[in-house]
Image (tube, rainbow, N blue to C red):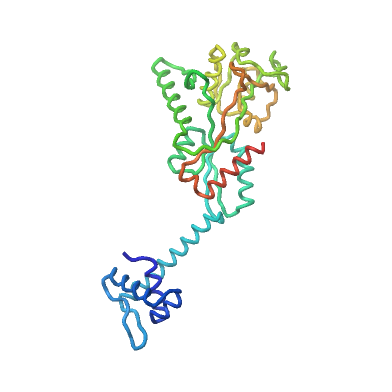
Amino acid sequence: MIEARHLRVLRAVARTGSFSAAARELGCTQPAISQQMKALEKSVDTPLVVRSGRGMQLSEAGRVLLKHATGILAGLSAAEEEVAAIAGLRAGRVRLVSFPTASSTLVPPAVARLRDSHPGVRVSLVEAEPPESLAMLRGGECEIALAFRYPQAPGGAPAPAPAHGTPREARAEANLEAQQLSATTDWSDLVVTPLLDDPLVGLLPAAHPLAGRGGGRGPVELAELAGEQWIAGCPQCRGHLVELCAGAGFEPRIDFATDDYPAVVGLVAAGLGVAVLPGLALESVRPDGVSEVAVRTASGAPAVRQVVALTLPDLAEVPAVALMLERLAGAAAGR
């Protein structure tokens, strides 16, 4: 097998014309150069140098090998430099996948801080909700996925949202959502960096009798909203809403479902129902015409969702990825 160190010796011998001169150039002994040349000739099974008077020249095979060695050694040198740049955070790439509310709140300050300190590291962002974002991470389409999950209520797994249609269609929809929830919350193969607990905020029409609970005048118990029409979000959020309401002793009547937070606010403002949205979502939406109230679960605890950054164990050792995780944690802690 031809080794890079042998090619470097061949190049030095060709350049200097002798083993002793090559030894001085490479900072080793003449016998060491001789041994490495013999090893290289043994690898290719043909002489590579011929003695000529008081010096030596490359044989035809030696000249052919030197021609290729020049490109090989240049490529190795470039590779070593690029790896050193990545290790030293003078270069590198981090691909982020994030759900929308984190994209508009946590990602911008984190990426800005990283670029300020390490401008050679490239960061890209695409948006996807879990479980799609987790599939992208596990499939090698990104290095970090921002995701969320809801704490499981005591006594069981999260409930899928109510399904509609025929009984067979309803069962199929419920099974699919249950599988999606399982894929979303199983992070056992990933490195988890907790970022924050995002409080869930109740949205009521401005004229609602409980709207006066806003402004720090006490939380609303979910049971107080049992008779309301509800506006729900994504399947995972909808499933958690159903679970919370079940803990409070009722099943919510979900008349509208949309992933668009401005649409949720608009529907609530029009008096068409009530909703619960993550606090991060309300930072990017003007809640005109609605009243924001704190929501308390049946256990008396605040309703929250856990926001995290996820990566694979091997990726967590990559300097640029580790730094991006640090910056995301810093952005969350600075809120």
Identify the residue at horizontal 57%, vertical 55% (top origin): 120
Residue at (53% x, 52% y) in the render: 92
Screen quadrant of the N terminus: bottom left
Q: How many marks?
A: 0
Q: Is residue 266 left or right of residue 61?
A: right
- Quarter the C terminus occupies: top right
Residue 106, image quadrant: top right
Q: Closest to the observer: 306 or 39? A: 39
Residue 104, compared with residue 201, is above or below; it is below
Tell me which corner region of the image, top left, top right, bottom left or bottom right, holds residue 49.
bottom left
- The residue drawn where x is 34% and y is 73% is 35
Q: Where residue 163 appears, x then y in whole percent?
A: 46, 18
The residue that appears at 40% across and 80% down in the rendered structure is 20
Which of 269/314 is in front? 314
Residue 291 % position (x, y): 69, 21
* Residue 312 horizontal/vertical position (percent): 47, 41
Residue 63 vertical placement versus 139 (above, below): below
